[in-house]
Image (cartoon, rainbow, N blue to C red):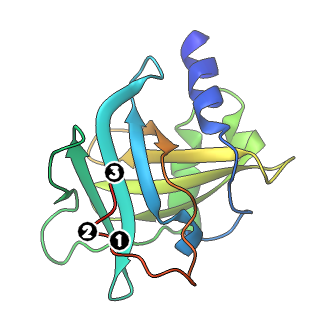
Amino acid sequence: MPKRLLLASTLLAPALAAAGDISDFDIATYSLDGKDGQPSGIEMRLSKVNGKWVMEGKEGGASPWKSISCDAGCEYRASTDSERGEYLASFPGDMPRQFDIACIQNMVNAFCRLTMKSDASKGGYALVGLVTVEPAPMSLRRLTTPYSPNTAVNTDATR
């Protein structure tokens, strides 16, 4: 029960886009939370390069960003309805009935935004591991504000 509450509370972060596909709104830096709900020290950065989604990660603040994608030919793509349903079902308790999910994925992981069905202003983010027998969701905490398409962004200079 405590793990369920911890995961749910982590995912109920404010400032979330309404239900829909992953979009420029989701471009940000995230902290991967540990099982105890505390930051793990691992950060993820979602961005777009030449119109393609890119996910990078690093451990500790001074480490360089590194791609967490698999090899070439493994770009992120929108998840299908069936895949999103499978990922949502991997979350504990009533979450599958309470949340809508939008994801992009490659062969290794899926980056997902969850939006509460009863209040689109509530939800959160998760990284779903796909190299396990069953999808394994891990909570992400957004560290940066939503991307504004009217603002020039130098992704190498952020965080």
136 on left or right of 115 = left
Quadrant, the N terminus: top right
Give the mark nearest the N terminus, 3 or 1. 3
Residue 34 appears in which quarter of the rendering? top left
Q: Tell me which residue sits at (53%, 50%) in the image.
A: 86
Q: Which mark is residue 44?
A: 3
Q: Nearer the viewer, mark 3 or mark 1?
A: 3
- Residue type at tag 3: Met
Give the mark nearest the N terminus, 2 or 3. 3
Q: Which residue is tagged 1?
A: 76
Residue ranking furthest to the top: 2
Nearer-the-camera pick, 25 or 102: 25
Q: Which residue is tagged 2?
A: 156
Nearer-the-camera pick, 143 or 115: 143
Residue 47 appears in which quarter of the rendering? bottom left
Q: How much space separates mark 3 and mark 1, taking CA atoms?
A: 15 Å
Q: Nearer the viewer, mark 1 or mark 2?
A: 2
- Residue 92 visible in the snapshot: no
Q: Tell me which residue sits at (68%, 41%) in the image.
A: 96
- Residue 104 visible in the snapshot: yes
Query: Of helix, strand and loop, which one carries label 2?
Result: loop
**Residue 144 image position (x, y, % from top left):** 49, 53
Query: Of helix, strand and loop, which one carries label 3?
Result: strand
**Residue 74 image position (x, y, % from top left):** 23, 72
49 on left or right of 23 = left
Label 3 packing within 10 angstroms: few (<14), some (14-19), many (20+): many
Give the mark nearest the N terminus, 1 or 2. 1
Q: CB under 8 Å between callouts 2 and 3?
A: no
